[in-house]
Amino acid sequence: MRASAAQGSLQGRLTVPGDKSVSHRALMFGALAVGTTEITGLLEGEDVLRTSAAMRALGAEVERLAEGHWRVAGRGVGGLVEPADVLDMGNSGTAARLICGLLAGHPLFAVLTGDASLRKRPMRRVTDPLSASGARFSGRAGGRLPLAVEGAADPMPLDYRVPVPSAQVKSAVLLAGLCARGTTRVEEREATRDHTENMLRHFGATVRVAAEGHGRIIELDGQPELRAAPVVVPADPSSAAFPLVAALLVPGSEVTVQGVGLNPLRTGLFTTLREMGAHLSVSNERVEGGEPVGDLTARFSELRAVDVPPERAPSMIDEYPVLAVAAAFARGTSRFRGLAELRVKESDRLAATLALLAANGVPATVEGDDLIIARDGRPAAGGGLVETHMDHRIAMSALVMGLASTAPVTVDDTGFIDTSFPGFTAMMNGIAGQPAITPAEELA
């Protein structure tokens, strides 16, 4: 695909797909609950559909009633059954790692695999702590997929300090702890997104959270009876980032994204954009399904450079590529600190972001785990071909850059955008009022 500079401003009120993190968890907790859980606003991207298929394979009844409206009849904690076939998680690291936690607490055998990108991603960060519960894992070098799992017949509760900030690792340990007698304790040195803790409470589990420095200690009482509960999935703040940043960069633009999740452990990008001088406002704030939500409006802004501290990374780890695009149009030298976790995403996202910038004439360097972008406030040159490495966020970030750059930006592969944002291209063309993003061959 190729994105060319918008011929006018971006305008509109829109809704982006449901939050991917909440969608995964809604299906999983519905499968573990007693009774029938109704889910509305579910993201129907490929990643989440892989989770729905896995829950069916593990014995839950999962039914799609209408767009975004799903019903899950659960089997209760400890009630999942052995799948008859391999569980293919596609491109979803979240699904693979969380399901490792689910499987660890059940006395069954299963095999997980995924696409070429997912099979390169490290799993030992979850399998190592989960092994202490009594589960056994056997995979390729580095614990990579395909991965065979033998769940524990009598899982032990875990007491684990997460070495690297990761909501996925924390969540996997807590999911395993549901089936264990006693209290599972997780200590994280930096607070990460807490959708798992919120949803555990929503379904009736006893969870205690205590702040400790920048981090938290989470305790879960094992073997609860989770009760079916309705879940309203908020709009994904990671997806909302793309039209909002585009509106900040294209002169004259004003775009509102409705019903965006405003969990404070997910809003680091919005804090950072405001520090850059972005006109970004929130209205109609409310609570839905245990999560704070609101309508976000972005207006074209002249941005300035920003220095992002490392402790903010967990609250915006997926948004750094599109933030880098915003910094490419800002005045001054921006520094994003502590981005080691970006190296183990769908791609080496730090290297891919650096390459995206370089291909489009934006001076940037990596020092250790910091990304540094030096700009003068003028539009990025554009004109480059971006290799996405099967990473949906790199693809969408590059297309956003093209809408405001001097020359068009071409992306080698957009097929993976549907993993998290079905209809992305049509939505962006809609607020542009023209086909600004088109198949590259049409422009050859």
Image: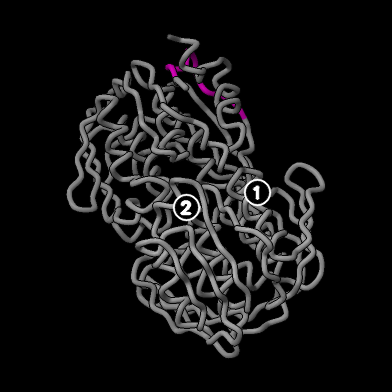
In depth, the one of 306 and 429 nearer the eye is 429
Using a 10 Å C-alpha cutoff, classify the residue at mark 1 as few (fewer than 14 neighbours), some (14 to 19) or many (20 or more): some
Residue tagged by mark 2? 267
Q: Amino acid at mark 2?
A: Thr
Q: Position of residue 379 (x, y in %)?
A: 31, 23
For residue 2, above or below residue 56: above
Which of the numbered marks, if any, corresponds to residue 49? 1
Q: Which residues are magenta?
A: 3-12
Q: Residue at x 17, y 48 (%)?
A: 367
Q: Is residue 391 above or below residue 247?
A: below
Q: Secondary structure at mark 2?
A: loop
Q: Is residue 34 above or below residue 25?
A: below
Residue 274's spot in the image, x, y percent?
A: 40, 44
| Main secondary structure of the magenta stretch | loop
Residue 94 colored magenta?
Answer: no
Tell me the quarter of the picture where residue 422 sits. top right
Specify whether residue 211 is in view.
no
Q: Amino acid at mark 1?
A: Leu
